[in-house]
Image (tube, rainbow, N blue to C red):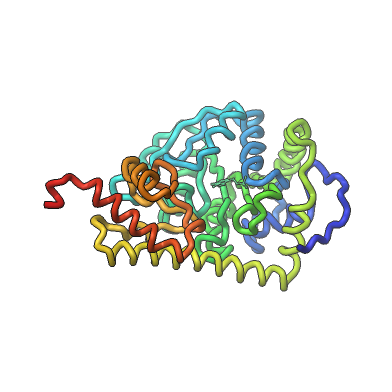
Amino acid sequence: MICRSADKEYLPITGMPEFNKLSAKLMFGSGSPAIKESRVVTVQCVSGCLSLRVGAEFLAKHYHQHVVYLPEPTYGNHPNLISAAGLTLKTYRYYDPKTLVLDFQGLLEDLGSALTGAIVLFHACGHNPTGVDPTCQQWEQIRQLVRQRGLLPFFDCAYQGLVSGNLDDDAQSIRMFGCDGGECFVAQSYSKNMGLYGERIGSLSIVCKTADVARRVESQLKLIIRPLYSNPPIHGAAIVTAILKDRDLYQKWTNELKAMRDRLVQVRRQLYDSLCNKGTPGDWSHIIKQVGMYSFTGLNKDQVDFLTREYHIYMSSDGRINIGGLSSKAVPYFAGAIHDAVISSLPSSTLA
Ligand SMILES: Cc1ncc(COP(=O)(O)O)c(C=O)c1O
């Protein structure tokens, strides 16, 4: 394991300066006007979770609107992290369980009638738990609506690179908002895309309207971080910095990331083909249309219970699976189990 930082000194309250600079570039792009104009503040945080929490604490202390809209459904820890800071939760429609796709109309309606100035949480890519993302055109419509209505976008970016296999493409949603002159928050995590789960390494970036505001925001962030955890850990930041600043290591990392993403796509295809070949009742094309690490299989609670009872296959009761946790070898067994679960849940008249 590479570790260019042999020392174990304390980091500054806002983390390793070089890590912050490279992380901002990774998210907003090397040509980002906001970075060039010194309007972006980036602070190293304790992974994605604490990046969200520090952002929420900042908003609770300094922002006039305390209502946050979360997509329905969303990552299970979002409500905890955001309400712990004292913010009020509401939801916006995101996913239609009947059609298993994005409820884009519902999303536009809910954000169109959201409270003025409200904070809106978006998953930058690879939405957890649905695996359903807006298209680029839809993001642009969302951006226009958010800016027209004066809403404040807060992106959670936990899967950059694992959706398209390309770090720039997966940051498109963030970059659209990051370069339009408006304000925007981004919580970033290296848990998944660098496999650094236990290092707890991530960052919070805030795009401000002017460089002067950015300087003041940074000093206020220090006042929030200091009593929370004083300063972040050093080892994960040293690993990330070593990779991001070295051309060869960066190339190796992006190649590995692409290979991991390709494996996710391949397992999705294998599962879909297996279900089609078995003639499992239903349309399973959502499995290959969804992106990233997660799939909402469309299995209902009874079917999930059946899998647990009869096959010792365990998944969340909403039918979500982590595609990354499924080996190619296990797919035939899994597909067979799904087939049985679906058949056994059909009304007996359908079998006759
Ligand atoms: C959408 C989303 N955000 C944040 C996180 C938290 O990640 P971290 O381990 O970096 O705290 C996760 C983890 O699963 C996630 O899915």
Q: Is residue 264 visible?
A: yes
Judging depth in this view, the residue of 32 and 350 nearest the camera is 350
Q: Position of residue 246 (x, y in %)?
A: 75, 68
Q: Is residue 40 visible?
A: no
Residue found at x 44% / y 43%: 316
Where 7 falls versus 257 (above or below)?
above
Q: Position of residue 226 (x, y in %)?
A: 78, 34
Q: Position of residue 17 (x, y in %)?
A: 79, 52
Q: Is residue 248 left or right of residue 178?
A: right
Residue found at x 15% / y 46%: 348
Residue found at x 68% / y 49%: 198
Where 85 falls versus 204 (above or below)?
above
Q: Position of residue 146 (x, y in %)?
A: 47, 43
Residue found at x 66% / y 28%: 61
Q: Is residue 192 left or right of residue 226?
A: left
What is the quadrant of residue 220 in the picture? top right
Judging depth in this view, the residue of 112 and 290 nearest the camera is 290
Please state the total of marks drawn on the protein image.
0
Q: Quadrant of the N terminus?
A: bottom right
Q: Is residue 305 left or right of residue 258?
A: left
Judging depth in this view, the residue of 34 and 251 nearest the camera is 251
